[in-house]
Image (cartoon, rainbow, N blue to C red):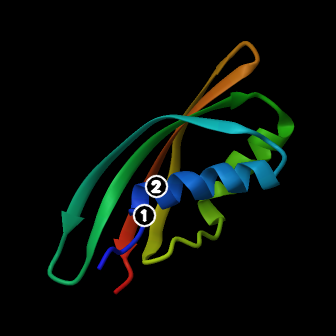
């Protein structure tokens, strides 16, 4: 039986939707994922690169992203960190690291 979309797909969709509801449009220009497992957890480390037009709304969204709630069916977001931002003229590129855990 198929579990549905994977954590990476759900995470990307959720980030785009949250940014949109905060009033800023983002594009995910790169998404890398490395799976990991321990004796008690199975999950993945995601590194995403986001690009957007710079604005106070984008700045506020990025600042609050660490505390955002994510609803990823079958997964939990264990940690989210904005690793850095680069501003070039009117555009912003942000790198985000996210740890997800399968919700069994």
Q: Can you give x and y, in whole percent of width and height, for residue 92 in the image? A: 66, 26
Q: Residue at x 33, y 55 (%)?
A: 45
Q: Position of residue 46 (x, y in %)?
A: 38, 51
**Residue at the location (79% across, 41% down)?**
24
Q: Which residue is mark 2?
A: 9
Element under disc 2: helix
Vertical placement of residue 85 versus 96, above or below: above
Q: Residue furthest left?
A: 39
Residue at coordinates 46% horizontally, 55% vertically from top-left?
9
Q: Quadrant of residue 30?
A: top left
Expressed as whole percent of the image width and height from the top left, the position of residue 1 reads 29, 80
Seen from the viewer's position, the closer of residues 19 and 79 is 19
Left or right position of 22 against 1: right
Q: Is residue 63 visible?
A: no
Q: Position of residue 22 (x, y in %)?
A: 81, 52
Q: Is residue 75 above or below residue 21?
A: below
Q: Which mark is residue 40?
A: none
Taking depth in this image into account, of 26 and 58 the one nearest to the observer is: 26
The vertical placement of 92 against 62, above or below, is above
Instruction: Tell how many labels.
Output: 2
Q: Are marks 1 and 2 in contact (CB under 8 Å)?
A: yes
Name the image quarter holding the C terminus. Answer: bottom left
Q: Can residue 96 be seen here?
A: yes
Q: Residue furthest bottom?
A: 104
Q: Residues within 10 Å of mark 2 (few under 14, many from 20)?
A: few
Task: Please give the residue where the numbered disc 1 appears in the rendered image.
Answer: 5
Circle 1: is it few (<14), some (14-19), or many (20+) Cα within 10 Å?
few
Q: Secondary structure at mark 1?
A: loop
| Viewer-closest of 39 and 8 | 8
Real-space CA distance between mark 1 and mark 2, rounded to the nearest whole angstrom: 6 Å
């Amino acid at each position: 039986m198929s579990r549905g979309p994977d954590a990476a797909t759900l995470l990307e969709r959720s980030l785009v939707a949250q940014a949109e509801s905060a009033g800023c449009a983002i594009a995910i220009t790169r998404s890398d994922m490395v799976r990991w497992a321990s004796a008690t957890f199975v999950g993945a480390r995601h590194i995403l690169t986001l690009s957007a037009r710079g604005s106070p709304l984008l700045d506020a969204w990025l600042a609050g992203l660490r505390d955002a709630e994510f609803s990823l069916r079958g997964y939990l977001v264990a940690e989210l960190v904005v690793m850095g931002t680069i501003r070039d003229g009117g555009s912003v590129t942000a790198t985000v690291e996210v740890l997800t855990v399968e919700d069994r």
